[in-house]
Image (cartoon, rainbow, N blue to C red):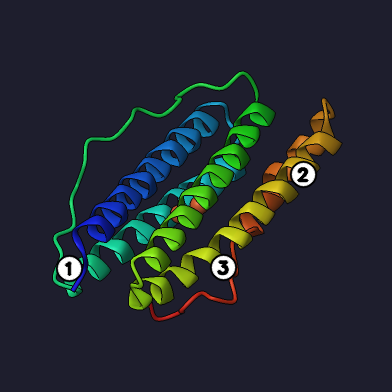
Amino acid sequence: MLSKSIEAALNQQIRIEAESSQAYLAMAIWAEVKGLEGISNFMYSQSDEEREHMLKLVKFINERGGHAHVSELKAPSVTFSSYKAMFEKLLEHEIFVSESINELVHISLQEKDYATHNFLQWYVSEQIEEEAMARTILDKVKMIGDDKGGLYLFDRDIQQLTVSSAADNPSA
Ligand SMILES: [Fe+2]
Ligand SMILES: [Fe+2]
């Protein structure tokens, strides 16, 4: 059984994952409108992944006798000054999510909730992967700079990039 404070903290994480999904959907749409098809496809799939992260939390809370909440969401940024600015925002957001997962892990230990602590390890590994990917992408974007040909190739190649986390459960 979940304690009320753990339940509230997990519900807060549901909101963060849902906001991530919305933020990345907005990025996908922006890139699509700008004609950056590869970047757009990549962000659409990132948005789907964040929704999966959210659903995993929903199931966990409900299975442990809690009640998952669907909260009001903060509106995401919908325009960006450049695709580089967009990817900077992506990395910044993933770092923020990692911090909130760390805080959750901390709370679970404080409350001696080892089931939740164990459950959260998947998110810890996932955040390492997602942050690393966002950094790799941003490094490439910085390398490309204003080179149009480079952007063309990047937009094509980014579609091959997905988070292949070792912690990923293929049946999930
Ligand atoms: Fe996530
Ligand atoms: Fe993420």
SS at badge 3 = helix
Q: Earlier in the sequence, mark 2 or mark 1?
A: 1
Whether label 1 lies within 8 Å of ligand 1 gets the answer: no
Q: Indicate the position of residue 82 as horizontal and vertical percent values.
A: 65, 23
Q: Which residue is mark 2?
A: 153
Q: Is residue 91 above or below residue 148?
A: below
Among numbered discs 1 and 3, the one appearing first in the sequence: 1
Disc 1 marks which amino acid?
Asn
Q: Whole-percent x and y of residue 19?
A: 37, 40
Name the one closer to the observer, 5 or 141: 5
Residue contact at pointers 1 and 3, CB within 8 angstroms: no
CB contact under 8 Å: marks 2 and 1: no
- Name the secondary structure under disc 1: helix
**Mark 3 lies on residue:** 125
Q: Between marks 2 and 1, how big is the CA–CA gap? A: 45 Å
Q: Eyeballing the image, is 132 above or below 135?
A: below
Closer to viewer: mark 3 or mark 2:
3
Position of 36 compared to 4: left or right? right
Residue kind at label 3, given as amino acid type: Ser
Sequence-wise first label, 3 or 2: 3
Q: Which mark is residue 62?
A: 1
